[in-house]
Image (spheres, grey):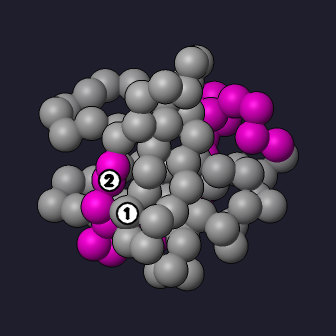
Amino acid sequence: MTRYPRRGSVVGYGHWARDVLVWTKAPLLLWSELVVVDDLDGQRSVGPNEVKRFGDDPFVMQLTDGATAEVAARADDSTLLPGRYG
């Protein structure tokens, strides 16, 4: 997740620090980016080939901070992904 427009997805690991999503990119997990989140625009289910390796019922949550970033997660993590906005 970067501040400039990007096409495609970025694989990595994220965790919340208050209203900031700390995103660490794979494969080496050495570079982190901070995404300040103002609001959640909701969640949606994914298309048939949109994400891989997220189980049977993955979803995508849209995070906004002037721009929109989409984060995919497993159905089991539906309570963790919204963080303090949940």
- Which residue position is annotated with label 1? 20
The quarter of the rendered structure image containing the C terminus is bottom right
> Mark 1, residues whose alpha carbon is within 10 Å: few (<14), some, or many (≥20)?
some
Q: What whole-number distance in Å separates the C-alpha atoms at marks 2 and 1?
A: 5 Å
Q: Quadrant of residue 49?
A: top right
The percent coordinates of residue 59 (x first, y second) are 63, 54
- 84 vs 78, nearest the viewer: 84
Residue denoted by label 2 = 35
Tell me: residue 38, above or below residue 67. below
The residue shown at (83%, 46%) is: 56
* Residue under the point 27% across and 72% down: 38
Q: Residue furthest top?
A: 27
Image point 55% across, 33% down: which residue?
12
Q: Are marks 2 and 1 in contact (CB under 8 Å)?
A: yes
Which of these two is toward me, 50 or 72? Answer: 72
Element under disc 1: strand
Q: Which residues are magenta?
A: 34-55
Q: In the rendered structure, does residue 11 fall within the stretch colored magenta?
A: no
Q: Position of residue 15 (x, y in %)?
A: 55, 55
**Of the pair 44 and 10, the residue shown nearer to us:** 10
Magenta region includes residue 43 = yes
N-terminal of the two: label 2 or label 1?
1
Q: Secondary structure at mark 2?
A: strand
Pick the quarter of the image with the N terminus.
top left
Q: Quadrant of residue 3?
A: top left
Would you call the spot at circle 2 few (<14 residues within 10 Å), some (14-19), or many (20 or more)? some
Type of amino acid under label 2: Val
Residue ranking furthest to the front: 30
